[in-house]
Image (cartoon, helix red, strand yellow):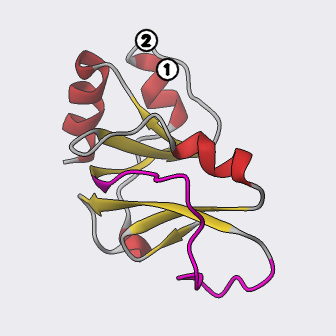
Amino acid sequence: MIHKNIVCTDGPKRYGKLLNPTQVGDIVFLSGKGILNYGEVMHPYTGVKNYPPVTDNNYLDEHSIDIDWHQKDFDRLKVVSASAIRKLGYGLFVPTIVSLASSVAEKIIGKLK
């Protein structure tokens, strides 16, 4: 879930651990039906659930990382399609937040600008 400048997982701690590989300064990509956005990790996952939750979620544990997104207007995202990513020679990944090798990242960022 995206809420303002955070990315959240809702559910048990094992879901929050999916956010764990990121460090401050990492450039991460939001994928879905292509690459939707990228940003810099400002605050990594701490292993502690958000309390109180920062989203409207009141029934599941919430875990998050803070990200400074390149594209701020989530209603007008420029998307790099899955087919465009395949043409660059890369496979698309499941909807998630991911870090990519710098050579891959630079090519995708170039398409998002």
x 21%, y 43%: residue = 25
Residue 71: quadrant of the picture: bottom left
Quadrant of the snapshot with the N terminus: bottom right
**Quadrant of residue 5 in the image?**
bottom left
Compute the Cα span from label 2 to label 1: 5 Å
Verify whether residue 6 appears in magenta.
no
Q: Residues within 10 Å of mark 1 (few under 14, many from 20)?
A: few
Residue 110 rendering spot, x and y as whole percentages: 19, 36
x and y percent of residue 9 in the render? Answer: 64, 59
Residue 28 in the image: above or below residue 104: below
**What's the amino acid at mark 2?**
Gly
Q: Main secondary structure of the magenta part?
A: loop
Is 42 situated left or right of 30 in this image?
Answer: left
- Residue beneath disc 1: 86
* Range of residues picked out in magenta: 42-59
Q: Which residue is drawn at 33% across and 59% down?
A: 67
**As rendered, which of 72 and 83 lies closer to the eye?**
72
Badge 1 element = helix
Whether pointer 2 and pointer 1 mark residues with C-beta atoms closer than 8 Å, the reply is: yes
> Who's the residue at 50% across and 40% down the image?
20
Residue 30 in the image: state x and y as whole percent: 46, 48
**Left or right of 84, for residue 62:** right
Element under disc 2:
loop
Q: Mark 2 points at which residue?
A: 89
Mark 2 neighbour density, 10 Å: few (under 14) some (14–19) many (20 or more): few
Q: Measured along the vertical axis of the image, is residue 103 above or below residue 76? A: above
